[in-house]
Image (cartoon, rainbow, N blue to C red):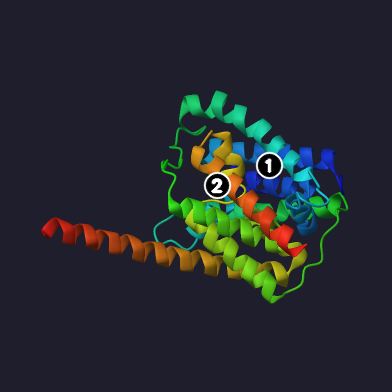
Amino acid sequence: MHNFTPWSSLLGGLLIGLAALILLWGKGRIAGYSGIISGLFSISDNKRWRILFLVGTTLGASAATYALHLKMAKLEISPLLILAGLLVGVGSRLANGCTSGHGICGIGRFSIRSLVATGLFIFSGACIVAMTH
Amino acid sequence: MITLIAGVLFGFGLALSGMMQPDKVVGFLNIAGEWDASLMLVMGGALAVFTPGYHFFIKKRQQTWSGAALHLPTNKTLDRQLVFGALIFGAGWGLAGICPGPAIAMVALAGWPAIVFIFAMVAGMLIAGYWQQRKNLLTEQITQLAASE
């Protein structure tokens, strides 16, 4: 096994699950990032909670990285990065969800749609990685 | 306030879990090569908390702590949009190793590359949204036409 970090990943996952539970119980909303982001661009929807949640995410992630001296990958702007962003945007909109909304909240609620979506995006991600590596 | 707290916790979890490191994401998807199973534990950990919390606590009450309504998805059909959408999403995820949550989480840490990724993602969402709208309009017109025949 390569680069395996079981404890930090498990603990991070527990926090993510707790956060999703708090958002649903506290605000009645599913913690799915693609939906939260695309809702910012629809006309009628309430945007305040969306912005608060996204700002909180950035704050929490930055705090964790500094406090625990976590490794932060150096990213570079490239055509590949832009293409990847486009695909992630188109795909998550069509599928009505991404890793957080389908992979955690959806599967956690035993949604068949989410189970199928998660299986398919892991499968196609694995195919792309197999082709590019 | 509770929304901000949920966001902070989610962000903290994303950073700690390794989801914000594209090489770990790619390592997880590299099932045929040198597999890094860490992200299985992220999902497992999140589900271990969310699933029982939802089923034993929230589902019974069907409302938030303050009595407000839950906004839950109601669509249950497995349609082509779900299938193609998930396949396209996975391709983008495998290319860069970044999905929407971590992209937002790394805005302050990674700066411009994260912002460029988010711009491209939002553009993709708007394109797909526009396409969906046109398709719905077209289906409506066809049904109307069929009804008037």
Q: Quadrant of residue A26?
A: top right
Tell which subunit mark 2 falls on: A
Tell which subunit mark 1 falls on: A
Mark 1 crowd level (few <14, some 14–19, many ≥20, 10 Å Cα): many
Q: Position of residue B133 (x, y in %)?
A: 36, 63
Relative height, residue B53 to residue B109 (above, below)? above
Left or right: where B39 falls relative to A117: right
- Give the amino acid at mark 1: Ile
Q: Quadrant of residue A119?
A: top right
Q: Position of residue B148 (x, y in %)?
A: 11, 59
- Give the amino acid at mark 2: Ala
Q: Quadrant of the N terminus of chain A?
A: top right
What residue sits right under mark 2 in the picture? A117
Q: Is residue B97 visible?
A: no
What residue sits right under mark 1 in the picture? A16
Left or right: where A78 falls relative to B86: right
Are callouts 1 and 2 both on one chain? yes
Q: Position of residue B36 (x, y in %)?
A: 81, 47
Residue drawn 68% across the image and 60% down it: A128
Q: Quadrant of the C terminus of chain A?
A: bottom right
Q: Identify the mark nearer the N-term, 1 or 2.
A: 1
Mark 1 vs mark 2, CA separation in Å: 20 Å
Relative height, residue B29 to residue B118 (above, below)? above
